[in-house]
């Protein structure tokens, strides 16, 4: 199956099937956000109508700390979806990423399915997307083509080795990735974001990514779309019993998003993606150490309906964030980053086992 055909198949499966990671037998989400409580401030002493949600990310101002996370592109049928998402991003003054541009680098006829994002969002922060496994193949020239294709403000390099290991056509040679990432960070004309795609990033790898020169980390933690789950459905359709088995076994593999935010909060901005389902999740992510949040799966079905459905969903999330900020007594996103919170349950256990403090103020920055 071609790269382009896989892109539309992935998109449709995300709409038609349950592809989220699950936390077995608990009723709690796999992201870890159910274990996080923001401490209520009964005397906020601020006016909810005067909250300041603007944030700056890689020298671009966003009206809210939200990105429409990388989703699609690379097939003619994805162009309308990207156009809808980009129009919503432009209207709301938030950022947007595109899906992997591999298909368009391999086949220039697919470029329009990505280029439409800049056409519809001329003023938005837009980031491109290529896989770490393809860096040596495409080289800096190929990545610059991807940048030019959408007038990208940054380029994301995605790490999807869980998915690659499940799909029979996957690229499972991960040797030299960090060296290749370092080269891209040094030579590419725009800042580089290194992002996981559902299995999270641990502290040591976050440090290595930062030292390689990345400008930001997108944790892509467990709790949102499980790409092992997506590959399970693909395997079922073609009768591939081995891939189906592997997909089921590794469906819930990875580091929960809430944990991965803490693990990755070092010296560069952190984007929280992976199971962000509400403005409260956004608030919790920022309190844990994220700079902003990326949302993907909840916007897929609305994007197939139209721009209003996407903006309505995003406006609801933004209003939930406003209420959470108000109830924590935070007038700005910066203040939210220092708000008191409590970490309980398996998320606390995970962090303690990993050497992070979760004491009086549930810190996100202190590793013992």
Image: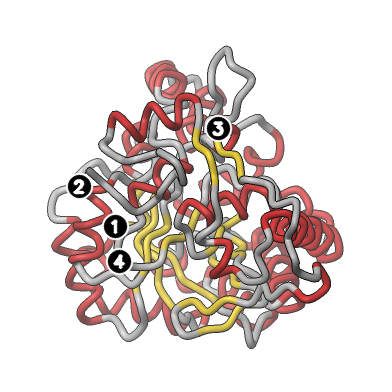
Determine the CA span between mark 2 and mark 4: 25 Å
Q: Characterize the local packing of mark 3: few (<14), some (14-19) or many (20 or more) Cα atoms within 10 angstroms.
A: some
Tell me which label, 2 or 1, sits earlier in the chain.
Answer: 1
- The mark that comes first in sequence, 1 or 3, is 3
- Does residue 147 lie above or below 336 as drawn? below
Disc number for residue 271 = none
SS at circle 2? loop
Q: Secondary structure at mark 1?
A: helix
Residue beneath label 1, please? 132
Q: Kindly report which numbered mark, 2 or 4, lies closer to the viewer in this rendering.
A: 4
* Mark 3 vs mark 2, CA separation in Å: 33 Å
State the separation of the CA atoms marked 1 and 3: 32 Å
Residue 35 is marked as 3
Residue 203 in the image, given as x and y percentages of width and height: 27, 48
**What residue lies at 57% left-to-right and 77% top-to-bottom?**
115
Q: Residue at x 47, y 42 (%)?
A: 257
Q: Is residue 332 visible?
A: yes
Around disc 4, counting alpha carbons within 10 Å, would you say few (fewer than 14), some (14 to 19), or many (20 or more)? few
Q: Which residue is mark 4?
A: 267
Circle nearer the N terminus (3, 2): 3
Q: Which residue reaches farthest top?
A: 25
Say which label, 4 or 3, has the lower sequence index: 3
Sequence-first disc among 2 and 4: 2
Q: Residues within 10 Å of mark 2 (few under 14, many from 20)?
A: few
At mark 4, the secondary structure is: loop
Residues at marks 4 and 1 touching, judged by CB atoms closer than 8 Å: no
Distance CA(mark 4)–CA(mark 1): 22 Å
Look at mark 2 in the image and give the residue it sits on: 174
Q: Nearer the viewer, residue 13 or 250?
A: 250
Q: Quadrant of residue 123?
A: bottom right
Residue 175 appears at what percent x and percent y? 14, 49
């Amino acid at each position: 199956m071609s790269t382009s055909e896989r892109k539309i198949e992935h998109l449709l499966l995300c709409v038609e099937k349950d592809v989220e990671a699950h936390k077995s037998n608990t009723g709690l989400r796999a992201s870890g956000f159910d274990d996080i409580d923001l401490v209520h401030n009964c005397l906020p002493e601020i006016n909810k109508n005067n909250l300041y949600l603007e944030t700056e990310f890689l020298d671009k101002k966003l009206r809210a700390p939200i990105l429409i996370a990388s989703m699609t592109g690379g097939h003619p049928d994805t162009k309308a979806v990207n156009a809808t998402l980009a129009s919503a991003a432009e209207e709301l003054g938030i950022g947007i990423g595109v899906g992997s541009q591999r298909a368009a680098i391999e086949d220039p006829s697919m470029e329009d399915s990505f280029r439409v994002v800049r056409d519809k969002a001329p003023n938005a922060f837009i980031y491109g997307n290529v896989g770490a496994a393809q860096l040596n193949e495409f080289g800096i020239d190929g990545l610059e083509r991807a940048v030019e294709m959408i007038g990208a403000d940054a380029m994301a390099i995605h790490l999807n080795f869980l998915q690659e290991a499940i799909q029979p056509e996957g690229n499972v040679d991960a040797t030299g990735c960090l060296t290749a990432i370092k080269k891209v960070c040094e030579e590419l004309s725009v800042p580089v974001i290194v992002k996981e795609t559902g299995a999270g990033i641990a502290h040591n790898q976050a440090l290595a990514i930062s030292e390689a020169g990345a400008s930001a980390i997108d944790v892509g933690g467990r709790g949102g779309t499980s790409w092992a789950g997506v590959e399970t459905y693909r395997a079922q359709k073609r009768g591939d019993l081995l891939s189906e088995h592997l997909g089921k076994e590794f469906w819930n593999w990875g580091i929960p998003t809430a944990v991965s935010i803490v693990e990755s909060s070092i010296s560069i901005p952190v984007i929280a993606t992976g199971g962000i389902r509400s403005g409260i999740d956004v608030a919790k992510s920022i309190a844990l150490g994220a700079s902003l949040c990326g949302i993907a799966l909840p916007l897929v079905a609305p994007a197939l309906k139209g721009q209003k459905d996407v903006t309505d969903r995003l406006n609801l999330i933004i209003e939930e964030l406003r209420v959470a900020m108000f109830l924590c007594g935070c007038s700005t996103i910066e203040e939210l980053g220092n708000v008191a919170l409590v970490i309980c349950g398996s998320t606390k256990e995970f962090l303690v086992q990993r050497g992070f403090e979760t004491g009086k103020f549930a810190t996100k920055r202190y590793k013992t």
